[in-house]
Structure formats: C-alpha cells, structure tokens
C-alpha cells in the first residue's frame, strides 16, 4: 500500500499525518522528509503495548540518546501527577526544546504527553503515534492537550499544542478487541453526522466490513474521518466557534464518564455513542430533527451492536450529578448548558444554551423512564 498523507495547516504549526501499514519501517525516511531532527527523544508508551513493538520502534528511530517511559493508561491516571513525572524525566535528562517527546498509545497517553510537551520549556517537539482507532481518528489530530480533574471533570486543564508529526499505522488496530474498535468507531460515526450524508451513507453501507478490519474499507473510513477533523481544525484551531461541532454528543458523554468515576463500565467511545444518542433524541424533542432522520441514525447505532443505554447505567438519583458535570463543561459561557445538536445529517447546530432544569426534565421523561 502506498503511503498516504494529509497536511494540517494551522496558525500555530503545519504538520503531516501519514497513513500506512507497517509505518514503523518507514519512520526515519518520514522524519528526513519532514526535516524533523532531534538529538534526544523520550518515548512514553502505553503499558498494554507489546514489549517487542515498543523495542522495534525504540531501536528504529535515529537519535544520539534515547529514553523510554512506561505509562499505565487510564482516565484516572490522566492527571497532573503523571504530567509532572514526564516533566521531571525531561529535566533530569537535560532535554532541550529541540528534543522530542513521542507518544505511543491511545488518546490518554497522547493527551498527557502533548500537554507535557507543550509546557516543557514553553514547548518541545512532539510526535504522536496513536495505536487505537479512537486516537487515530480523533485525539491525535487538532492539538488539544489536557488532563482530568477528579472532582470537576474531563479535560478541563490543558492547552492547544499542535504535534510536529502524526503516524497512523493501520496494523496497530489488529490488536484491538471489539469493544475498543467500537470505542474508536464512535468518533468516525460522529464525524459523519456533522459532515455530510455521503460520509454517513458510506459508513452505513460498510459498517460490518469496517468493524471486521477489512483493510480497504477501514483505511478509507480512517482517512475520511481525519479529513473531516482536519478541515474543521484548520478553520477554527482554538474552538472559538465552528470547532464546537466536534463536540456533538460530548457534553452528555463526558458527564456520563465523570458520573461513572471513569470506571470500566463506560469507556470514552461508549460515552460518546450514548452522548450522540442523547443529543439526537434531544434534537428530536426540540423539533430540530425529523423523526425519519432520527430513526435512520438510531438504526445505524443498532448495526454497531451497541447494547448500553443510559437507563441501564444511571438512576434518578444520578441526574443532578450528571448535570453538575455538564455545567462544568468548558464550552459553557454562562450558567446554562451549551449543547451541540443536529437538524439533519451534515447539519449540526452550535451555541444552543439550555437551563439545567430543562435538561433535567428531559432526562426524567425521555431517558430514565421514571
């Protein structure tokens, strides 16, 4: 397969995203092509990645001094304490801002490493090698960094810091289980809803092939999804307006995750699907979305074989806790909750604030079924 690439052009930085199988074998050629040079690198890798994979990449990349650091990836560990561990390592080994931090793993590792890279000496080089579908189509693109606050919510502390390079190796996806694939597919699905009917219909037709990792269908879905996010980020790098469309389902979804204390009962992608379902139903409830389109979206979610529902996870007593996390969402600029909704496939609505009492009423009537 020929190496494919996208160029992301933002005000902060221009960088490339490369797609292929076995990209590890091409890594030094890509670094040369991108004129990306450094004397030292620290590779922070997810503990779930096989040792021989880490070693292969570690040995392959040319540098005068090489270091590696294992990270036990979880939402609970995406915090200041672990950012500080990375920073202390860089200080101890006398890294300069011309050296490089490399993330190898999912979105949690990427978010943490990019945040550390952004604040170390006011910014050092950063390469992202995402190994999960979720990270490949979402977290690795766009320059959002961040850590969680256990009390107040997800990704509330962070920066905008574009990477110097993103390497998307489709082969990594072979190691994922079904739940992890669905987690990543959630963002591909969301991107299709905010972009066009054409993208949605492609997914609707080939969802089985994509989730079975049929290479040509999966690669197209990944590249198309990255293109959608790239185009949005280029127009609105720091989420002043348009980029909010990428948060379809996330205001609900992040609150669901936080209300579950980031436990394994609900991973990020599952929370996004639940959040999209909720946002779509809220859109129907407010008469923004037609019943026909609503049913089409719900039928697609059924094809994912997604079994979780809000009323299976939460009870009436949890609603106020969910609402408190929604109120803390970073998109809010008042005491109301700002939602991203849909008026059609490819037609998102942004900047729609609602009072929490209105959303509470919706939860009680439409979701909790009490």
Image (cartoon, grey):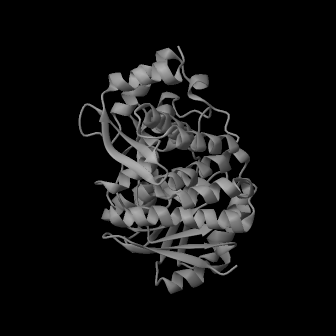
Q: Position of residue 345 (x, y in %)?
A: 49, 51
The quarter of the picture where the N terminus appears is bottom right
Q: Is residue 185 above or below residue 68?
A: above
**Residue projecting furthest to the left:** 334
* Residue ID at (46%, 84%): 35
Percent across and percent down for residue 229 are 46, 61
Total numbered circles: 0
Residue 300, percent across and down?
A: 64, 45
Residue depicted at x 42% and y 47%: 247
Q: Is residue 272 visible?
A: no
Residue 284 is left or right of residue 67, and the answer is left
- Quadrant in which residue 282 is drawn: top left
Residue 280: percent from left, percent from top: 49, 39
Pick the residue in front: 313 or 344: 344
Residue 370 visible, this orientation: yes
Q: Is residue 193 left or right of residue 214?
A: left
């Amino acid at each position: 397969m020929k190496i494919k690439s996208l160029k992301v052009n933002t005000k902060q930085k221009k960088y490339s995203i490369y797609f292929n199988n076995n990209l590890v074998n091409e890594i030094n050629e890509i670094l040369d092509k991108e004129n990306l040079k450094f004397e030292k690198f620290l590779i922070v890798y997810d503990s779930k990645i096989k040792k021989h994979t880490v070693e292969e990449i570690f040995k392959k990349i040319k540098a005068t001094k090489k270091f590696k650091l294992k990270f036990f990836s979880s939402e609970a560990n995406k915090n200041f304490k672990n950012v500080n561990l990375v920073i202390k390592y860089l200080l101890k080994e006398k890294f300069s801002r011309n050296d490089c931090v490399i993330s190898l793993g999912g979105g949690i590792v990427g978010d943490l490493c990019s945040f550390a890279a952004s604040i170390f000496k006011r910014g050092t080089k950063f390469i992202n090698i995402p190994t999960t579908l979720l990270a490949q189509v979402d977290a690795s693109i766009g320059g959002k960094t961040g850590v969680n606050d256990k009390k107040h919510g997800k990704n509330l502390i962070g920066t905008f810091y574009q990477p110097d390079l993103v390497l998307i190796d489709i082969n990594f996806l072979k190691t994922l289980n079904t739940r992890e694939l669905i987690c990543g597919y959630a963002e591909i699905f969301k991107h299709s809803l905010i972009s066009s009917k054409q993208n949605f219909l492609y997914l609707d037709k080939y969802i089985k092939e994509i989730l079975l990792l049929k290479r040509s269908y999966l690669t197209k879905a990944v590249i198309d999804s990255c293109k959608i996010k790239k185009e949005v980020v280029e127009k609105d790098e720091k989420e002043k307006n348009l980029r909010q469309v990428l948060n379809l389902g996330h205001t609900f979804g992040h609150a669901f995750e936080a209300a579950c204390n980031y436990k394994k009962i609900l991973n990020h992608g599952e929370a996004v699907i639940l959040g999209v379902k909720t946002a779509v139903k809220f859109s129907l409830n407010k008469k923004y979305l037609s019943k026909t389109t609503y049913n089409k979206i719900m039928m697609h979610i059924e094809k994912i074989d997604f079994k979780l529902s809000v009323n299976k996870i939460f009870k009436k007593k949890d609603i106020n806790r969910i609402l408190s996390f929604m109120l803390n969402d970073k998109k809010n600029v008042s005491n109301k909750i700002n939602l991203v909704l849909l008026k059609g496939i490819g037609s998102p609505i942004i900047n729609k604030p609602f009072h929490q009492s209105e959303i509470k009423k919706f939860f009680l009537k439409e979701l909790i079924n009490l």
